[in-house]
Image: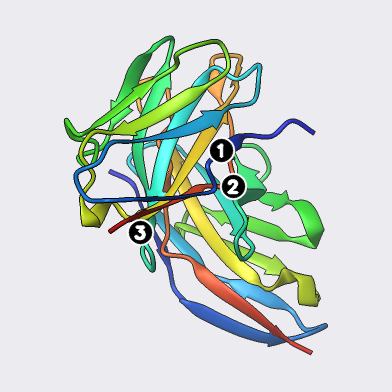
Amino acid sequence: AQSVTQLDSHVSVSEGTPVLLRCNYSSSYSPSLFWYVQHPNKGLQLLLKYTSAATLVKGINGFEAEFKKSETSFHLTKPSAHMSDAAEYFCVVSDRDSGAGSYQLTFGKGTKLSVIP
Amino acid sequence: EPEVTQTPSHQVTQMGQEVILRCVPISNHLYFYWYRQILGQKVEFLVSFYNNEISEKSEIFDDQFSVERPDGSNFTLKIRSTKLEDSAMYFCASSDLTQGITYEQYFGPGTRLTVT
């Protein structure tokens, strides 16, 4: 069984300061890991994904995440927060060897990021 | 850029009524999914669909739910007799199949279902 724990329900940063959103996962197989972002009243947009290639993954809008198998972590970072980054962020895991052909995503509870001007 | 679309954006219905939520996945995608997010809770997987049949379903997806791909473009979720606890945001998603591996899922904007 797979699961995701997002360690912070709410993170608040000042504009221009670094962002760190923490995520730990549990998976029986070799996982694929994703970060999705949801802006108010919008759908879920993929920020970045890890699928067993490079452990440091670069995504859109300057976000990065590092896959650390030993720590079962996939934290999301950005060097400098922008006002437009204010949104809810979801860490997501998918077992790539589920056997059923499709890949059920398991979501974390989400971290709401606030950016203070 | 191609995107997943969903209609309606908001649906209000009375308890016991049937509702159909509609989705148009990205045209060359082969896997289709429904998820739901009850207010304040996690996004939860409901069902996946491939080659005109259900691939996987969660415990939530009971006999009250059904999915269908009635034509080459639409993918629908039907709830036969809605309950108050079905009130949620319902997301449709689709994904491609590349070299035998499905890739990231692209989500629609969601349909907010309110059951009164």
Q: Percent position (x, y) of residue A17?
A: 77, 84
Q: Percent position (x, y) of residue A54?
A: 68, 43
Q: Disc 1 marks which residue? A: B6
**Is A4 placed above or below B52 here?**
below
Q: Residues within 10 Å of mark 2 (few under 14, many from 20)?
A: many
**Is A43 placed above or below A29 here?**
below
First-in-chain label (1 vs 2): 1
Closer-to-camera residue (B23/A3): B23
First-in-chain label (1 vs 3): 1
Q: Percent position (x, y) of residue B20?
A: 38, 33
Q: Does residue A35 appear left or right of residue B81 in this picture?
A: right
- Callout 2 secondary element: loop
Closer-to-camera residue (A40/A75): A40
Q: Is label 1 in contact with label 2 (beta carbons under 8 Å)?
A: yes
Which residue type does callout 3 highlight? Ile
First-in-chain label (3 vs 2): 3
Which residue type does callout 1 highlight? Gln
Closer-to-camera residue (A58/B110): B110
Q: Percent position (x, y) of residue A108?
A: 42, 59
Q: Which mark is residue B109?
A: 2
Which residue type does callout 2 highlight? Pro
Q: Chain of mark 2?
A: B
Q: Disc 3 marks which residue? A: B38
